[in-house]
Image (cartoon, rainbow, N blue to C red):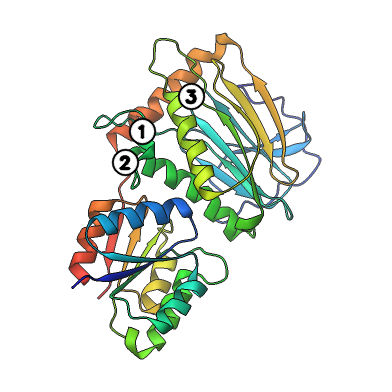
Amino acid sequence: MTRTILAVDDSASMRQMVGFTLRRAGYQVVEAIDGVEALEFARGNAVDLVLTDVNMPRMDGITLVRELRQLSPYKFVPMLVLTTEAGPEKKLQGKQAGATGWLVKPFNPEKLLATIARVL
Amino acid sequence: MLTAPPNTAPKTPKPAAAPGFSNIQRFWDSHTGHWTARILPGEFYVTRSDEGVSTVLGSCISACIRDRVNGVGGMNHFMLPEDNSVGKDSWSMADGTPSTRYGTNAMESLINEALKLGARRDRLELKLFGGGRILPSMTDIGARNIAFARNFVRIEGIPVAAEDLGDTVPRHVVYFPATGRVRLKRLRALETQVIAAGEFTYRDRLAAQPAESDVELFD
């Protein structure tokens, strides 16, 4: 069965690169431009994994993870953060919000796919 | 302009650096009457104060960004690392090559830090400088950097307010995010060797330590 990944990033270049990588690896990808759009989609649809940026307009990725964890269908869904933020404080915030893992950009397709395979 | 200007007394107090940017060297530029941050290849600087950001470019690119309304913005200075595995127009590949991913990261880091200081993505304007073919013997890495930068801003849909790209000259650029003003000086050939040497060092550093993404899975 094809797995669906919700990919959230406010940068069109990142959405393009990440989306291409995931689709080529056989995943179905739903793209969202910020936390608000992602949360709206997640409320009405099931996804197998959430991959989100941190700094985004309207709702950041850490808030998104926290909000999603409140929803019972998303209690155990893997949520990975892909970000330019390498600082330990942000990382800790992500962990406390309920993120499964933290990937620091620059984006590396092989590493991303390997990490997704591990947590799915 | 490569040496520090005469050390006259500052007329305004040095603005506080944004979190994470206190390591960037800043000096009082009596010429412009502004505190000015000096960035080197691979560095970037963002501010919400009325100060300048200065750099010297050969084949590297500087993107200058600012929020048109509140003046929060800054400047980066980067080049694409060499891609030995693929053709030179590889920046068009949809998931990027290691070099375009490095470039994307340089642009995104600048944008993200500006957004954190209060800039809004939908109000960003951008200016692009550099990408000169400063040494005729080299492959035209400036052109490759320009192609990447143009492609990036097209995909992101950020309006380009001004640019001075290509040609065979090095450039000294000072950018004032608060107003969007730019002071640009095309440098003489005399300074080319020094600038090229600095860029070679940067390029070698990138080749020796490819930008690596770091992964941590929480328990």
> SS for tag 2?
helix
In front of the other: A120 or A44: A44
Is disc 2 surrounded by few (<14), some (14 to 19) or many (20+) residues within 10 Å? many
Q: Are marks 1 and 2 in contact (CB under 8 Å)?
A: yes
- Please identify the quadrant where the C terminus of chain B is shown: bottom left
B148 lies above or below A86: above
Amino acid type assigned to the residue bearing label 2 in the image: Pro
> SS for tag 1?
loop
- The number of discs equals 3
Residue position marked by numbered label 3 in the rendering: B59
Residue B133 percent coordinates (x, y): 48, 17
In front of the other: B20 or B123: B123
Alpha-carbon distance for marks 1 and 2?
8 Å
Which label's residue is closer to the chain start, 3 or 1? 3
Residue position marked by numbered label 2 in the rendering: B98
Identified at 50% across, 60% down, the residue is A10
Image-quadrant location for residue A2? bottom left
Which label's residue is closer to the chain start, 2 or 3? 3
Image-quadrant location for residue A91? bottom left
Is disc 3 surrounded by few (<14), some (14 to 19) or many (20+) residues within 10 Å? many
Which label's residue is closer to the chain start, 1 or 2? 1
Q: Can marks 1 and 2 be said to lie on one chain?
A: yes
Q: Is residue B122 left or right of residue A86?
A: right
Q: Can marks 2 and 3 be said to lie on one chain?
A: yes
Residue position marked by numbered label 1 in the rendering: B81
Chain ID of residue with mark 1: B
